Amino acid sequence: METRIDEVADRIYRFSTYVPRGNTGITFCQFLIDADQPMLFHCGQRFLFEGMVQAMRKVRDPATLHWIGFSHGEADESGAMNDWLALAPQAVVAHSRLGCSVAVSDHAIRPPQIVANGEVFDLGGKRVRFIETPHVPHNWEACLLFEETTGTFFTSDLLTAFGECSIESDGGDVLTPAIATEEAAGFTSLGPKTAPTLRKLAALKPRHLALMHGPTWHGDGAKVLDDLAGYYDERLRREMAA
Ligand SMILES: [Fe+2]
Ligand SMILES: [Fe+2]
């Protein structure tokens, strides 16, 4: 398995590994926000850790990582959290009060930094806003991240598509493959707050959508998130009527 490196926005690096698993396989992406206080978003699974470290060395010394973030507790999000904490002696995991309470404070080898909903961290050259999104895409403690200087929204599992994806997409259709994957796998905790949460995220007006399992998409991110909300509205009505 090869971990690819692509700069998908100014000093936002996407590390992607295609893992042939099941019928289609799936691509796992992790992101380095390169700043005075560099931040890794998504720790990745432990089996990807060594390859990821070697890849990151081509961009920046991983031992200089300052912040570690992820959406929710799950192998591809937080599996290698402690490996990163061991490698980068000053690194701190940043997560919500709820996330720290239900998972991180117990799982991490060092105390995490509790972040308020909507709080912005100035990383020095990059500014990241933490947004609590309970059960979106899934897990009570789910959070998502928006980098303000580039307009990059890190979507975690939102818009997941199975298979080996393209690296970047300039306005291409990410919705159709994502809906097909959702219909097949049902990975989102669908409920009455799913679509309203997506519409709040659309208000960020992102210019780049950095998917965990898909390309980094460039264009009118608000429209994609609004359209995704429309799909979940329809699906909720459909499932309630079934
Ligand atoms: Fe997930
Ligand atoms: Fe994921």
Image (cartoon, rainbow, N blue to C red):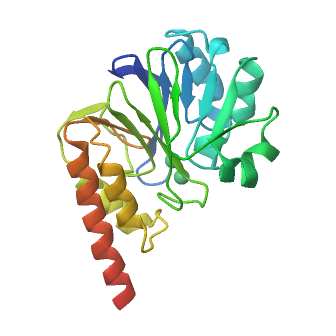
Query: Which of the 4 image quadrants contains residue 176?
Result: bottom left
Q: Position of residue 71 (x, y in %)?
A: 55, 46
Q: Would you say 137 lies left or right of 150 here?
A: right
Rendered location of residue 184, percent (x, y): 39, 66
Q: Is residue 17 above or below residue 130?
A: above
**Residue at 47% in and 58% down:** 136
User: Is 10 rendered above or below residue 137?
Assistant: above
Q: Image point 60% across, 9% down: which residue? A: 61
Judged left or right of residue 19, residue 221 is left
Q: In which quarter of the image is residue 67?
A: top right
Q: Nearer the viewer, residue 118 or 9?
A: 118
Can see residue 16? no
User: Residue 237 lies in what quarter of the image?
Assistant: bottom left
Quadrant where the C terminus is found in the figure:
bottom left
- Determine the residue positioned at 49% across, 55% down: 133
Residue furthest toward the bottom?
Answer: 241
Q: Which of 172 and 191 is in front in this view?
A: 191
Question: In the image, 1: left or right of 226?
Answer: right
- 176, above or below 89, in the image: below
Residue 44, given in percent of the width and then of the height, sits at: 59, 36
Does residue 155 appear in the picture of this structure?
Answer: yes
